[in-house]
Amino acid sequence: MIRIIFSLAISIAALCGCVTTHGFYSVDAYDANGNNLNNVNLTVQGRGIYSARNALCQRYPQAKVIIRDIKTNEELKSESPYQCR
């Protein structure tokens, strides 16, 4: 029983460790022609990028979502670009 609990705790810790996004990001949706679809500046902090990305994909199902660091204007390579389905 203790092994099962220990294994479960390790698994949860490993999954939580995968999402270590820090900082502030802009999240934008683009169509196939490169036109910006969202008409507002969407700025999120840390893991909020996932909620913002999912909201944009729900609103614009075929969009490509670009996530950029506010300070450097560089794309967040691990999460961007993201193709909505």
Image (cartoon, grey):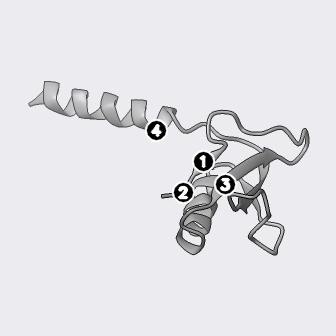
Mark earlier in primary sequence (1, 4)? 4
C-alpha separation, residue under disc 1 versus residue under disc 4 = 21 Å
**Marks 4 & 3, CB-CB < 8 Å contact:** no
Q: Which residue is mark 3?
A: 65
The residue sitting at the left extreme is 1
Q: Indicate the quadrant where residue 30 lies.
A: bottom right
Given the image, on which type of amino acid does mark 2 rest? Cys
User: Contact (CB < 8 A) between labels 1 and 4?
Assistant: no
Q: Which mark is residue 82?
A: 1
Callout 1 touching callout 3 (CB < 8 Å): yes
Disc nearer the start of the sequence (2/3): 3
The residue at the point 79 percent across, 46 percent down is 68
- Can you say whether 16 is above or below 58 in the image? above
Are the residues at dot 2 and dot 3 in contact (C-beta closer than 8 Å)? yes
Q: For mark 2, what is the residue? A: 84
Q: Label 1 neighbourhood size at 10 Å, few (<14), some (14-19), many (20+)? A: some
Give, as a three-letter code, the residue at label 4: Cys
**Residue count near mark 2 (Cα–Cα under 10 Å), binned few <14, some 14–19, many ≥20:** some
Q: Which comes before the other along the chain, label 2 or label 4?
A: 4
Q: Looking at this view, is 28 or 34 the one in front?
A: 34
Task: Give residue 7's quadrant in the image.
Answer: top left
Q: Earlier in the sequence, mark 4 or mark 3?
A: 4
Where's residue 54, x and y in %?
Answer: 55, 62
Q: CA distance from mark 2 to mark 1?
A: 6 Å
